[in-house]
Structures are given as C-alpha cells and as structure tokens.
Image (tube, helix red, strand yellow):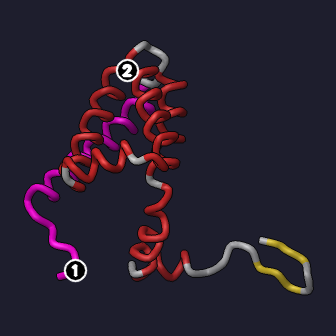
Amino acid sequence: MAYELTEQKKIGLGLIGFGIFFTFLAVILFFDRGLLALGNILWLTGVALLLGWHSTWNLFTDRSNYKGSGCFLLGLFFIFVRWPVVGIIVEIYGCIALFGGFWPTVKLYIDQIPVVGWIIQYPLMVVEDGKSFV
C-alpha cells in the first residue's frame, strides 16, 4: 500500500473532520466565537497528528509559507479578540496560501473517484472558433 493509514492518522483525520464541522456550525450560528475557536484547535491538532509534529512544524515555519502561516495565525488571533468574521476570512486566505501546493495532488485523487472524477475531467470553458462560452 502506497500510503498506510495508521491509528494516529485516523485520529488526525477524525479531528480534522470535527474541526471543519464545528467551524461550519459556527458560521451557521452567526460566527459563534467559541465554536470557531474549538474548530480551529481541533483542525490544527488533526493536521499535526496526520502529518506528524515535525512535518507540521516544518510546514508552518518554512520560509515560502510565511504568508500563509501568518495569515492563519492572525485569523486565529482575530477570532480570539472577538472579530470572528474578519478572522475567518483571513484564516481562509491563510489556508489557501499555506496548502496551495497540495491542490494538484488533491485533483489527482478526486479524478479517481468514479462519478466525481468524470465530471471534473470535463473543461469548464469550451473554445470554438475563437469564442469562449460556458
């Protein structure tokens, strides 16, 4: 098996799932500060368990990831000082900047899912005779 899913990684995936769930629930409940903080803590712990503590530290402290790490931590700070809307927006940008390099790998994985992969493989824009349309 190319990627072994140990018990620690299963727990990490579960914590990431609960973190995303609590964050989504907090957004639905008008940016509840407590649920946002709980979701962030669960998500960060899950990432650390999934990747490993050393790899997570290297991910957040790598020179090329300073912008994403700083934005994510700044968003976490905004949530703790009672600015949850600004905090979640800054955190989303930080996550995109931090994990942007993983998108090609995620796309390859999604392409292998039977129905979803077939839909994603079709281009969104079709060009005929120099005209673009959806």
Q: Quadrant of residue 22?
A: top left
* Total numbered badges shown on the rendered structure: 2
- Residue furthest to the bottom in view is 129
Q: Is residue 67 above or below residue 51?
A: above
- Residue furthest to the front in view is 63
Q: Mark 1 highlights which residue?
A: 2
Residue 78 x, y percent position in the rendering: 46, 20
What's the magenta bit mostly, secondary-structure-wise? helix
Q: Mark 2 highlights which residue?
A: 33
Q: Earlier in the sequence, mark 2 or mark 1?
A: 1
Quadrant of the rendering where the N terminus is positioned: bottom left
Residue 13 x, y percent position in the rendering: 22, 54
Q: Is residue 2 magenta?
A: yes
Q: Residue at x 32, y 26 (%)?
A: 37
Nearer the observer, 92 or 94 = 94
Helix, strand or loop at label 2? It is helix
Quadrant of the rendering where the C terminus is positioned: bottom right
Q: Is residue 133 left or right of residue 97?
A: right
Q: Quadrant of residue 38?
A: top left
Magenta segment, which residues?
1-29
Q: Is residue 7 left or right of residue 71?
A: left
Nearer the observer, 51 or 59 = 59
Q: Is residue 104 magenta?
A: no
Q: Is residue 8 above or below residue 27?
A: below
The Cα atoms of the two marked residues, 2 and 1, are separated by 40 Å
Q: Residue at x 39, y 78 (%)?
A: 113
Q: Residue at x 44, y 32 (%)?
A: 27
Kindly identify the amino acid type of the residue bearing the numbered disc 1. Ala
Crowding near pointer 2: few (<14 within 10 Å), some, many (20+)?
A: many
Q: Is residue 92 above or below residue 81?
A: below
Q: Quadrant of residue 61?
A: top left
